[in-house]
Image (cartoon, rainbow, N blue to C red):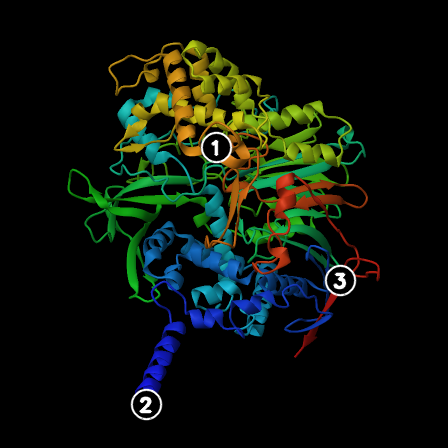
Amino acid sequence: MRLFKTILALVVLLVLFILLNNTQGSIPPLGKFMNPFAGFWTNGERLDQIEEVIDVKGLRDGVKVVWDERHVPHVFAENTYDVYFAQGFLTARHRLWQMEFQTHVAAGRVSEIIGSKAIEFDRKQRRRGLLFAAEETINHMDKNPETHLILQAYANGVNTWIESLTPATMPMEYKLLNYEPEVWSTLKTALLLKFMAWDLTGRNSEMDLSIIRAELGEEFVNRYYPEDTPRMDPIIPSGKPWRFDPMIPEESPPPFEPQFVRDLRADEPDKDNGSNNWAVSGKKTASGFAILANDPHLGLKLPSIWYEIQLVTPDMNVYGVSLPGAPAVVIGFNENISWGLTNAASDVMDWFEIEFKDDSYTEYMYMGEWIKSDMRVEEIIVNGGETVLDTFAITRFGPTVRFGHYTLDNGHPTGLAMRWSAHDPSNEMDAIRGINVAHDQESFFKALEAFDAPGQNFAFAGKDGDIAIRHNGKYPLRGKDQGKFVRAGRDTTGEWREWIPDDQLPAISNPWRGFISSANQSPVAKNYPYYMGWEYDDYERGSRINDRLAALNDIRFNDMQQLHMDNFNKQAQLMLPFLIDHINRDSLSIVELKILDDLNQWNYVSDPQEKAAWVYKQWWLQLELAIWQDELTIFDEIRELPTRSVTAELLLKNKNLIFFDDMNTSQKEDRKQIIRKAFHTTIADLTEKLGDYGEAWELGRARGTDIHHLLSVNGLGRPGLYTGGGQGIVNATKKTHGPSWRMIVEMGDHPLAKGIYPGGQSGNPGSFYYDNAIDNWVKGHYYDIHFLSTPEITSESKLRLTNLRNYQ
């Protein structure tokens, strides 16, 4: 019996050893993960220590790194190679897992990590062409010697850090998911840049509008989806003359009804990916120096999307935020200039329906002939499963992202090809490097010529007092509305063959009003000769920013901080009094009367404690559905709704409109009835979700903001943040989306700057610097930025010094 118990104990121990050291389905090997010597426990040790000397293999000379109190590295190098090598090394030290995981997402390689549940996602990513676009781009970048040196130096720095890792020092997520980092390549940086381009430009409504046009007619689309929406305050003031001879586009193709009817918006980026930026002339500031401000609005995650850094060489001193995985500074300032970005939102994607000869998709119809497709075979490696092969055709109109669902009357199968400007080779790294070393407006604009995708509004402020903004990017020459609908990819009609010249892109310098700004609205008024798109953000944010900047004088940092955090809701100011006037108080319950009174007393400021702010938001959404849902539910999907300003204009100007009537009821509804019905529905829905009217209805509680870990692992994020703001508001904070970096720079003799982002420098959840800035970000506080000219520090300073020492 004793021998049997001994054998049984050994068997149980062996089984436990096997179970704990091997993956069980989606569960990681818990033995490795919990190992006290190499498991996740060790990620809480020595995280934030700053070494006086680090021996680093691969440097050409010594590098000094000054660390400030927020663990921002200020890198001082003697040459270009070493400064980007050090940037790669230090970024990987803080963010290795994040930067590598995002390249797996971009390349459609998530199945290699988490298994079969990601196969369909990977398939979509491969067909969208981010990987082959990155391959083409890195080949193009490598032809530029300086770009090649920068990218390779950065990669070498990342790999030097990877080589230093042990099982104990491996980032926690690798342990959680049971895999290891691979060698960093320059291709991964190109993938990251394409992924950012997709996040900012990978969305449009061509399929929806094609379906709406087929169902409701051309006049409906032209009226309710206009290029010029009501109250628009464009980026370039409408009075600016355009002194050039424009190119003449071809005639727009005739109307075409595609076979595909599915909503292409599925899995597309957030439509509110945008930003605010502005710059004010010294004539309007207290110091007499120009001030620039920027706050890019993106999905909020931990680790944070940005990594703060200063890079100094004999010919460069630049500070700002970088993308983990890419060298240089994307948004920031140097001794002479500052710059900020917002998403241009102009149309750089078209969809073409392709007619294939048969279901092999190897030939497609073009100009009356069958021509060969370029067939691409993708190997999707699946963790714990068999490799999946996915074959798709690449046509002259782009990769066929969707196919295999529909056929034409002649029996030929169809596919939907995506023409996207970011598929073309480009060298944004050359542009960013040029911006980092630019010394005035002329050199800044010159650098922008290499920045093709994603299209951005580049705001500029210089030490010499210049301010400017340019709607930058590579935009196809098209006729009016040419990119608004899916087109037939059968001939040359609608093909991209020419581009709007760089010197004819919308731009303005030193305007008479003393400021420039952008908030993703239309870049130009009707007098601009080129069609650039129609799907811009509505007027509210841009108009509010311009109102405040026009009214402000003697501007100081605090004024800019307040504008970043401005929660005024211009749409509510326009519509709420009108809506309240249509409510019959006699028909309301006691609770509804109380809510209506709160709405009536609300000052339109969407601060977190405001219950009225959330009630109004939900009331408006209910009203939009009441007007449009029955007409725009086509093929069992709700299609793209008209903009808020279009819907508001209809309500303000029409008592009776066919769209106010709910086609699903026998009663004929008018404006007053749908407003009242939407109000009652809103209160009932909110009561069901939030309980009795009270604290839970506050904007900061009912919505608030959640910042999740990239893997959405509970305990590694910061949910339930008490925030205000929202869609159409300057402080564009939403549930999981908002200002990802707030920066203000005054361009005096020595730049003064403040900044903050919702997270911290470290990607390790066990570090103090993982999320140390979030609470101050919520409050609208900023940190003073240390813009250093020398690595020399005093013993009294909070700064610390690390010497990166080359060894062979």
Please name whichever residue, 479 or 722, is drawn nearer the observer in this view of the structure.
Answer: 722
Residue occupied by mark 3: 800
Query: Are there few (<14), some (14-19), or many (20+) residues within 10 Å of tag 3?
Result: many
Q: Residue at x 81, y 34 (%)?
A: 287
Query: Which image quarter: residue 82?
Result: bottom right
**Residue farthest to the front?**
1
Q: Residue at x 30, y 39 (%)?
A: 491
Whether residue 280 can be seen here: no
Residue occupied by mark 2: 3
Residue 801 spot, x, y in % from top left = 75, 64
Q: Is residue 52 above or below residue 310?
A: below
Query: Are there few (<14), some (14-19), or many (20+) residues within 10 Å of tag 1?
Result: many
**Amino acid type, label 2:** Leu
**Amino acid type, label 3:** Arg
Quadrant in which the N terminus is drawn: bottom left
Query: Which image quarter: residue 782?
Result: top right
Secondary structure of the residue carrying tag 3 is strand
In terms of sequence position, does the residue under pointer 3 or pointer 1 come before the other? 1
Residue occupied by mark 1: 532
Q: Nearer the viewer, mark 3 or mark 2?
A: 2
Residue 135 spot, x, y in % from top left = 45, 58
Q: Is residue 122 above or below residue 169?
A: above
**Amino acid type, label 1:** Met
Query: Are there few (<14), some (14-19), or many (20+) residues within 10 Å of tag 2?
Result: few
Residue 707 spot, x, y in % from top left = 52, 47
Q: How far apart are labels 3 and 1 at the CA level?
A: 49 Å
Q: Is residue 622 found left or right of 256 in the rendered image?
A: right
Q: Is residue 104 found left or right of 278 in the rendered image?
A: left
